[in-house]
Image (cartoon, helix red, strand yellow):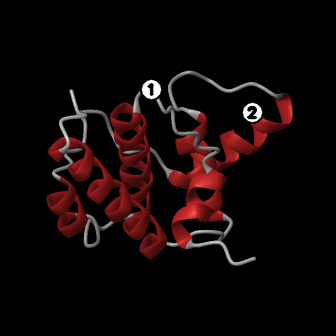
Amino acid sequence: MHVSRFENIMDLAAAEFDTHDLWGTAMGMLFDVAAVLDMTDADGSVTPIPFARWDYHRGCSAVPDIQALADRFAHDYAEGEFADDYGYCVMSLASAYVDGLVSQADLIYAGDVLDRYTRVLRSAGKDY
């Protein structure tokens, strides 16, 4: 069975869509994908175009080192607990990127899918 790039990223992030809050779930995943994409772009040459397209603006905090976050994920996963400062989705996707399971292009593709989905929800009046 073939798994799409989008499905692969959602599986790696253990994403589950809350049918009672499709908008919130999709926006949360879009922020997680954007955060990891931001970590992969040390020189800042990749993110400006998709971030503008998604109308995403980085928060005020520093962008974490993706290798350090992936190492922390491996440790936390082994211990069975995760710190609250980074959610499971972000840590899992960061680890998947470091391990070569996803690429920047995959993250951009997933972000584009989520962006289109949130626009459909917004046009249907299902945003908040």
Mark 1 Cα-neighbour bin, 10 Å: few <14, some 14–19, many ≥20: few
The amino acid marked with disc number 1 is His
- Residue position for label 1: 20
Q: Total of numbered circles in the picture?
A: 2
Which quadrant is home to the N terminus?
A: bottom right
Residue at 61% across, 36% down: 88
Residue 53 % position (x, y): 17, 62
Quadrant of residue 9 within the rendered picture? bottom right
Residue at 58% across, 69% down: 102
In the displayed orientation, state which residue is furthest to the front: 124
Residue 51 % position (x, y): 22, 58
User: Which of these two is toward me, 27 or 41?
Assistant: 27
From the image, state whether disc 2 or disc 1 is nearer to you.
Answer: 1
Going from N to C along the chain, the mark reached first, 2 or 1, is: 1
Q: Which mark is residue 76?
A: 2
Q: On the picture, is 21 further left or further right than 77?
A: left
Residue 50 % position (x, y): 24, 65
As displayed, is residue 40 above or below residue 121?
A: below
As displayed, is residue 23 above or below residue 45?
A: above
Residue 83 % position (x, y): 62, 23
Quadrant of residue 16 within the rendered picture? top right
Which quadrant is home to the C terminus?
A: top left
Residue at 30% across, 33% down: 61
Q: Which mark is residue 96?
A: none
Q: CA distance from mark 2 to mark 1?
A: 30 Å
The amino acid marked with disc number 2 is Asp
